[in-house]
Image (cartoon, rainbow, N blue to C red):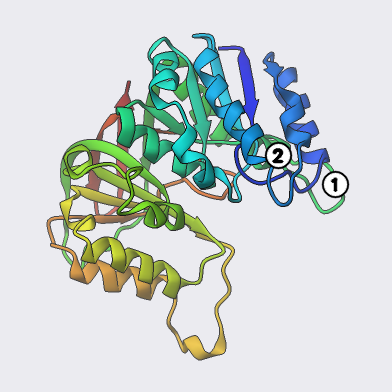
Amino acid sequence: MKSIHLIAPSGACLDSRSPANGIDWLKRQGFSISNEACAQRIHQRFAGTDIERLSELNQLSQLSPDSLAMATRGGYGLQRLLPGIKWDAITKAIQNGAQVCGHSDFTVFHLALLAKTGAISLAGPMLNFDFGCLDDQGGLIEPSPFMWQHFQNAIEDRKLDIATQHPQNFLGESLQGLTSGILWGGNLTVLAGLVGTPYFPSDKQISGGILFLEDVNEHPYRIERMLMQLLDSGILSSQVAIMLGGFSAYRLYENDRGYNLNAAIEMIRQRLPKAIPMITGLPFGHQADKITLPVGARAQLSYQSSGFALTASW
């Protein structure tokens, strides 16, 4: 695959140098880039008007089989477009070989596509941060080789294969297991906001699934509150495993008095059935080192107290 079609369905780019650097880097890797102009659109805080962004998404139905659509960045804005997206037409392009990739606010697209048609999309890198990230002086930060390798595995070979040595806490037990299920999830804030809507996958689709979650700029008590919502709604207890990626860029306060992200995770873990592992250390989220995850594909997970391995092909 040597063709990337850019889309900007959410927030406007914060610094025009970032997408320009990302486009230049990808071209140097041999990719042809189309729809570069979308990175320059601005309407309020969005990357264009709702009409412009919706039209751009619906044009994904015209993607060639060897093309990958990549979001420029997240932010907010895709949820406003959901009723007008032509899911069946986009799914036909995906079934013919096209691929669609993004994360953060793009979780909206992943989950809605899964809910509406069951098609597979990629939770993975985006143009600005992953390929055009800037340092404090405005220079390009080279993309993560780890991210790039896993991204290539996904788009070229349609495979996921990650093994980590990351100590796990299974409530003091030496738990290990091997399981499989539909891989789904994304940004926790975005996912929680879709619960109860027609754009959230059905119980039939995700029961017995492997749920992955990440977030950014959210205090641990907010993380806990959203996990509580998923717990009380029965979503967490219907999974075979829950995998937590990066929860980054938050600030603790004096009145937390020792309450932190680990405390929030442990509270949820203690309320889950013991047979459902809550695994930490998934390399995914708002971070340079991230894997590319096929939302809607069946994955295999093996885990023990010293780490885990996650594989899929689609």
Instruction: Tell me which residue sits at (78%, 25%) in the image.
Output: 24
Furthest residue toward right:
137
User: Measured from the top left, where is residue 248 in percent x and y?
Assistant: 54, 60
> Disc 2 vs disc 1: which is toward the camera?
2
Q: Which residue has dot 1 on it? A: 138
Task: Please identify the quarter of the rendering in which residue 12 is found.
Answer: top right
**Mark 1, residues whose alpha carbon is within 10 Å: few (<14), some, or many (≥20)?**
few
x and y, in percent, of residue 298 in the image: 25, 30
Residue 179 relative to residue 8: left or right: left
Tell me the kind of residue under disc 1.
Gly
- The image quadrant that residue 174 belongs to is bottom left
Q: Give the mark, 2 or 1, whose residue is nearer the N terminus.
A: 2
SS type, badge 2:
loop
The residue located at (27%, 69%) in the rendering is 268
Circle 2: residue type = Gly
Q: Name the residue under label 2.
A: 48
Q: How far apart are marks 2 and 1 (CA)?
A: 25 Å
Assign the N terminus to one quadrant of the image. Answer: top right
Seen at 33% across and 41% down, the residue is: 184
Q: Tell whether label 1 touches label 2 (CB within 8 Å).
A: no
Q: In the picture shown, does residue 247 fall above or below 48? A: below
Residue 196's disc number = none
Image quadrant where residue 68 sits: top right
Q: Nearer the viewer, residue 96 or 211?
A: 96
| Residue placed most toward the observer, 60 or 308 | 60
The local secondary structure at tag 1 comes to loop
Is residue 144 in view from this perspective? Answer: no
Label 2: few (<14), some or many (≥20) within 10 Å? many
- Image: 211 above or below 237: above
Q: Which residue is drawn at 59% across and 45% down?
A: 74
268, 169: nearer the viewer? 268
Depth check: give the residue in front, 69 or 141. Answer: 69
